[in-house]
Image (cartoon, coloured by chain):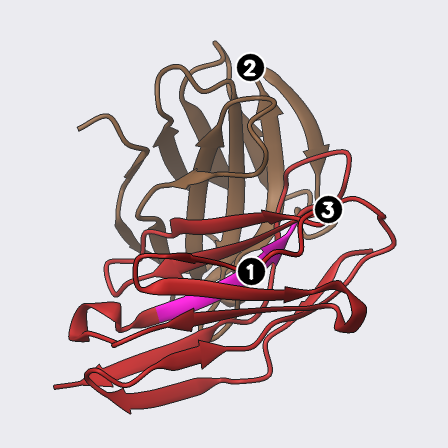
């Protein structure tokens, strides 16, 4: 069974600080995808990034970057130079190999103060 | 706007009443998902459809819950004899089959059972 753990419940930072969100996952699949979604106060979950387990290369996309380490089953996500609009709940998610119904972590609430 | 839309956005009902939520997915998406989200938790999978076929139901979906997608377009989620424990946000998402896990979510329907 898939399991996603986000140990951080809340993070509060001042604008322009970097924020790193932790995600640890469990899966028996040898091939899998990992996701990060953002849920702003409006409630609509927004897809941010997707990573294939074959590719452990860490990347940067704008102010977002991620650190995928298969050896520790971690998929951490960093927001660089945070902005007030980044305030939201962030979810890490993992689907089973044969389908795309996502298993979400409990989420980390990020508050960016001006 | 061609995103996923849900109706109603908020519903307050008395225990024992029936409620129905509607979801209109993105028009070309053949997969439709229902999730439930309670305060402080990540979304939990309830059920999903591929076109009009309901392919999987979670054990969370008791006999009081029923979902349909009669013409493979919009979907309804009905809860009969509501209980206070049904109070939650009900999220709908859609995707294209084969598109690896990027779900497009609606803003959700918040149910409060008094």
How far apart are labels 2 and 3 at the CA level?
Answer: 30 Å
The residue carrying mark 2 is: B51
A84 to A50, vertically: above or below: below
Quick one: A105 or A66, which is closer to the camera? A66
User: Which residue appears at 80% of the width and 69% of the height?
Assistant: A71
Residue B1 percent location from the top left of the image: 17, 28
Find the magenta span and give its range. A89-94
Chain A rendering hue: red
Chain bearing tag 2 is: B
Q: Can residue B82 be seen in this view?
A: no
Q: Is residue B25 left or right of residue A86?
A: right
How far apart are labels 1 and 3 at the CA level?
Answer: 12 Å
The residue carrying mark 3 is: A54
The quarter of the image holding the C terminus of chain B is bottom left
Q: Can residue B95 be seen in this view?
A: yes
Chain bearing tag 3 is: A
The residue carrying mark 1 is: A58
Residue A59 percent location from the top left of the image: 49, 57
Quick one: B21 or B35, which is closer to the camera? B35
Quick one: B28 or B20, which is closer to the camera? B28
How far apart are labels 1 and 2 at the CA level?
Answer: 36 Å
Quick one: A49 or A110, which is closer to the camera? A49
């Amino acid at each position: 069974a898939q399991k996603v753990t986000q140990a951080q419940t809340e993070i509060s930072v001042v604008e322009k600080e970097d924020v790193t969100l932790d995600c640890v996952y469990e899966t028996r699949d040898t091939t899998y995808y990992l996701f990060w979604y953002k849920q702003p106060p409006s409630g609509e979950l927004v897809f941010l990034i997707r990573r294939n387990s074959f590719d452990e290369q860490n990347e940067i996309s704008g102010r977002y970057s991620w650190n995928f380490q298969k050896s520790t089953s971690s998929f951490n996500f960093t927001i660089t130079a945070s902005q007030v609009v980044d305030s939201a709940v962030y979810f890490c998610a993992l689907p089973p190999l044969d389908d795309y119904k996502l298993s979400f972590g409990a989420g980390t609430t990020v508050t960016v103060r001006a | 706007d061609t995103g996923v839309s849900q109706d109603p956005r908020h519903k307050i009902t008395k225990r024992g009443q029936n409620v129905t939520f509607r979801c209109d997915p993105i028009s070309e998406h053949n997969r439709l998902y229902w999730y439930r989200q309670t305060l402080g938790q990540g979304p939990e999978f309830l059920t999903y459809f591929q076109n009009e076929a309901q392919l999987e139901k979670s054990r969370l979906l008791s006999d009081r819950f029923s979902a349909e997608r009669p013409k493979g377009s919009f979907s309804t989620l009905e809860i009969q004899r509501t209980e206070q424990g049904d109070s939650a946000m009900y999220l709908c998402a859609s995707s294209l089959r084969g598109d690896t896990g990027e779900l497009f979510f609606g803003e959700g329907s918040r149910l409060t059972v008094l």
